[in-house]
Structures are given as C-alpha cells and as structure tokens.
Image (spheres, helix red, strand yellow):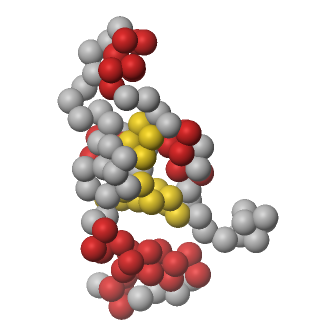
C-alpha cells in the first residue's frame, strides 16, 4: 500500500544492521542512509569467511565500504539525520529547501 500510494521509503541503517533486516527491509529503500561506521551485513565476517573460503577486504561490512560499492546512498551522522530527512522529503515532494538549493 505504501508503494501504491507513491510515498518515498527511506532506509536508515544504524550500528549494527544485520541479518534479515539487511537482506529485506533495508534493501527496499528509495534512499538508503547509514550512520558513519555502521556495521551492515547478513552474517558476521567469521561465518562469511568460513563459508566462502575467501579473504575479506578490510572494512567490508562498514557503511563506508558499502557507499564506495554503491550499496547505500549516503552516510549521515545521527546529529544531521533529521535535517537530511527533511531535505529528502522536500525533494520527493517536489519542493526544495534553502539548504538544498545552497
């Protein structure tokens, strides 16, 4: 019903965001935001390493790694989250805030 109403869906990843949340609700967002340094993943690094038998890149489950690889849209501190969400709501409504214009 949310999608049918054409409402925006924002996913906000806090530390940690793991398992089913990461594999379902999080991935559906029109815009995916994460806190700096948030650990995000389906399983922990030990389980992934044992399962894949691969050496994992440094920081592969951090918000910064996911941003670099296109899996999230922005990293926003909790202090700035309210303002960023305001700007996104304005943008999705077709209006622009003074901050967004600047």
Q: Quadrant of residue 51?
A: top left
Residue that lies at the very extreme toward the top in this rendered image? 53
For residue 23, above or below residue 29: above
- Estimate the x, y position of residue 27 in percent, counting from the top left: 55, 47
Q: Is residue 43 visible?
A: yes
Residue in view at x 61 percent, y 68 percent: 8
Residue in view at x 45 percent, y 60 percent: 12
Q: Quadrant of residue 18?
A: top left
39 to the left or right of 9: left
4 to the left or right of 101: right
Quadrant of the image for the C terminus?
Answer: bottom left
- Estimate the x, y position of residue 72 in percent, counting from the top left: 41, 50
- Estimate the x, y position of residue 87 in percent, counting from the top left: 43, 79
For residue 33, above or below residue 69: below
Residue in view at x 33 percent, y 25 percent: 45
Residue in view at x 66 percent, y 71 percent: 7
- Observer-nearest residue: 1 or 95? 1
Q: Quadrant of residue 76?
A: bottom left
Quadrant of the image for the N terminus?
Answer: bottom right
Residue that lies at the very extreme toward the left in this rendered image? 58
Q: Is residue 67 visible?
A: no
For residue 28, above or below residue 79: above
Q: How many marks?
A: 0
For residue 40, above or below residue 101: above
- Observer-nearest residue: 44 or 53? 44
């Amino acid at each position: 019903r949310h999608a049918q109403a054409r409402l925006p869906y924002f996913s906000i990843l806090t530390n940690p965001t793991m398992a089913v949340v990461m594999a379902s609700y999080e991935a559906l967002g029109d815009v995916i935001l994460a806190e700096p340094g948030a650990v995000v993943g389906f399983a922990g690094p030990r389980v992934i390493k044992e399962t894949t038998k691969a050496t994992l890149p440094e920081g592969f489950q951090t918000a910064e790694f996911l941003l670099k690889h296109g899996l999230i849209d922005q990293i926003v501190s909790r202090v700035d989250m309210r303002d960023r969400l305001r700007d996104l709501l304005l943008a999705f409504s077709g209006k622009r805030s003074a901050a967004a214009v600047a």
